[in-house]
Image: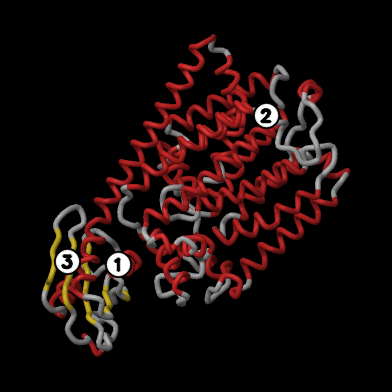
Amino acid sequence: MSVPDPNPASSAATPSRRRFSVGGPFTRGEWLALGGIVLGYLVIALLAVRRGPPLGWDEAVYSLRARDFAAGDPWGRYWDSFRAPGLPWVLSLFWGLGGHPTVFRAVVAGFGLLLVLVAWLLARHLFGPRSGLVAAAGVALSPPLLLSATQVWPDVPGAALGLAAVAVFVLASGGERSSWWMLAVVPAVAAATLLRFGAPLPIAVGLLVVAGWRRRMLLRYPGPAIVTALAATAAVVVILTLPGVTGGEASPLAAIAGFEGSSSSGFADYADLAHQVVGPAAVVLALVGVMAGFGWASRGDIDRGALWAAVIGGLATAVALALVLHGEVRYLAPAYPWLWAAGAPGLWRLIALIPGRARSVTVGAIVVALAATVVGLARERNRDAGREYGSTRAAALEIAAEAAGEPCLVVTARLPQVMWYSGCEAAVFNLGEVRWPELSGRAGFMLLVGGFPRQPEGELLAAYRAAAGERVLFLEGRRPAEVYLLEGDPAGG
């Protein structure tokens, strides 16, 4: 992918960089400002996870795998080979802190902090220290990223290490010659792939965009880039094609190819989600910065090549993700830091136009407003998820109390969440006839939760209720829940 070279006027005004540079010396004021951004992010993230909702389906899956990693047990029927094991393995290292969802969400938020810091270094190198701080603050206050970073999901962790790989490539190719520090891209790519099997796609897009931008220097000194590309590609191929590396029954590529949810409807999905994708005030602010940046770039005040690289990096990443997978806002985590890197220099120059003390007041008011918005959205998300999954958690906890620590099995459509909160094994409903697995001396339960798929309906539902024993729990609400005891093995199960 070819990206325009920096214009001569801008290049002449930019001092030559060392072969591995983060954009010049650091000042005390910059460290203080960065510390304030980090502290603000941590406070917001902790507010989001402190009273987090019950685990959702994917969150429960990764939490269960972390539990089994910590115990040294093989994974159960809740796990699939298309899921990357890196995040639950990392979470298992924190199992000694209680194995609580809040701990796991805080660990993922830690990866979000890494994403903030990498965005700072990337924008700092491209456009200078002040732009770096603007980009860091923007990433820290963007709802799509903050909300994803406070769930037990691998999207932000994969994006953080993926952007770190691209940032290393940018820094190592920023001088007059390539630096062999570029080889640090390889372990970052491998780690990102183990965290999220989809991570190589946005990484490849980012690396190609940067290579297109700096193609002349890389063609003159290709050695580090060639070795890095070959080694990173080999690492990804090994991880995605050898089941032994990830511990799955099949290779990740084969599992992903056979996954029904892998077909793409991304563009239509993101159009429906536009209010979440581009609607938040922080995202609108970044877009304003991009437009302003092109105005200053036309006058030679901003490195035009760097600006185009950041813009194309973000757009190409978003398009690539929409082409290969259905759309969820969290999947776009690798694209937003590029947007903020592109918007930062323009925003900083807009801020500089504000005179005197009004500048500090304006910046403070914007930051407070953005922080209040993202905190409010996190609370709304937690409240909605609590209504959605609260009855499942309450019913599973009731099953745990009924089982009283004895071996147990639950027939349910909400398999991973029920396994996590009840401590029982779980099996899905047979939707052809009334049948459940052999209990083998275990206490048996059936859990029905209203409104969820993969549950019996109509006459089959009535037959399941008739075949079960006593109903020990009924919960009203948005998702009514019923718990029944199982007696015997229907249909010779």
Task: List the residue tagged with mark 1.
Answer: 418
**How far is disc 3 from disc 1 in space, using C-alphas?**
13 Å
Residue 463 placed where, x, y %?
Answer: 16, 77
Q: Nearer the viewer, mark 3 or mark 1?
A: 1
Residue 113 placed where, x, y %?
Answer: 52, 44
Task: List the residue tagged with mark 2.
Answer: 127
* Residue at 28% over, 86% down: 438
Task: Compare marks 3 and 1 and give the one earlier in the sequence.
Answer: 1
Residue 62 placed where, x, y %?
Answer: 43, 63
**Residue 376, quarter of the rendered image:** top left
Check residue 186 in the rendering and tell me which mark sits there, or answer none.
none
Identify residue type, mark 3: Glu
Helix, strand, or loop for circle 2? Answer: helix
Task: List the residue tagged with mark 3.
Answer: 482
Residue 262 placed where, x, y %?
Answer: 49, 60
Q: How many numbered discs sit on the rendered protein? A: 3
Q: Is residue 408 left or right of residue 461?
A: right
Q: Is residue 237 left or right of residue 433?
A: right
Quadrant into which the N terminus falls: top right
Identify residue type, mark 1: Val
**Residue 101, quarter of the rendered image:** bottom left
**How far is disc 1 from disc 2 in space, using C-alphas?**
49 Å
Task: Compare marks 1 and 2 and give the one earlier in the sequence.
Answer: 2
